[in-house]
Image: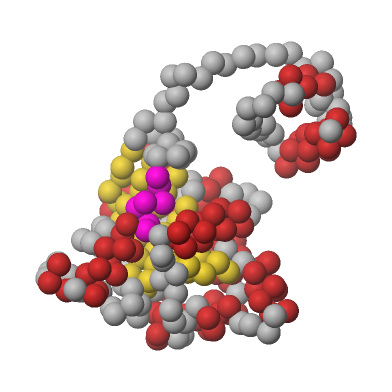
Amino acid sequence: ILDKIYLVAVTPTGSGKTGFLFLSLLVMIAIAAKPSLCPYITFPKDPAIVVVCPTNSIEQQMAENMGKLGISALMINADTVISARLGGEDLWIQAREGVSMLIPGPEQLISRGFQELLKCETLYDRVCALGVDEIHLLLLWGLAFRKVFTQIAFMRARFRTGIPMIGLTVTLLSDPKVADAIFNLLRYITQHEFYLLRRSNARHDIQILFRTLVSGIDGLHFPEIAWVLKNNDKTLIFGATISLVFRLKIHRVYVG
């Protein structure tokens, strides 16, 4: 990152992916305060990084984690913009100074507030890196139901030339065609321009169980998952569609 080389890190959940973001930022802040630490590179007085996350919950988690590290982070999405406005505040004005990590939602990248923010030199000149969490969603979501996610590609072009991008994901298939498709969405970037760090996601302690579903997949009741709901372990129930997830939620509420 210090050499301004783009990075895509594919690492397991819980392995500390966000470390690539906050460690890079902390190093930038340290060098900005004491240039002798790394004489061959310079950073502005108050370096900042812009990070885009796919969901509000991930944005909130990111902001909270940065706060624990003493990093000033500002999360801007539809909910926080409205909440701040009701309190007589403007988050886009707050973002101009004193924020080390700006976390805008994908939809905010096409907002008037973001456009005006890019015209503010106090922020524009401070941005030293761009981050994208769950970068594989550029392909999975950007070409399907959430096309605004592709605005991340244009975001890179709006900042100073040469700013490195940090892409993080747990899921990026080894098929080079998949990676090439993602990089093509980033506009004028090829896979060879990124340093690809891939760590194994293998889970050898996982046991796969198959159970026959006897209730209708389009229904509202799923007694087959009762054994899952009754245990006290953390459990992830995956639904292939938003509709199915909604109906699974209804079943969960219904059975208590």
Image: 127 above or below 13:
below
The residue sitting at 84% across, 33% down in the picture is 256
- Quarter occupied by residue 166: bottom left
The residue sitting at 54% across, 84% down in the picture is 93
Where is residue 143? Give x, y as percent: 58, 51
Where is residue 45? Give x, y as percent: 29, 80
Left or right: residue 241 versus residue 190 is: right
Depth check, front residue: 162 or 128: 128
The residue sitting at 74% across, 19% down in the picture is 227
Q: Is residue 163 visible?
A: yes
Q: Is residue 162 visible?
A: no
Quarter that holds the N terminus: bottom left
Left or right: residue 229 versus residue 144 is: right
The residue sitting at 44% across, 82% down in the picture is 97
Left or right: residue 1 versus residue 172 is: left
Q: How is the image coloured?
A: secondary structure
Image: 144 above or below 220:
below
Image: 121 above or below 146:
below
Where is residue 131? Give x, y as percent: 41, 59
- Residue 220, magenta (yes or no): no
Depth check, front residue: 154 or 15: 15
Give, as a single range, the part of the protein colored magenta.
16-22
Where is residue 217? Give x, y as percent: 80, 26
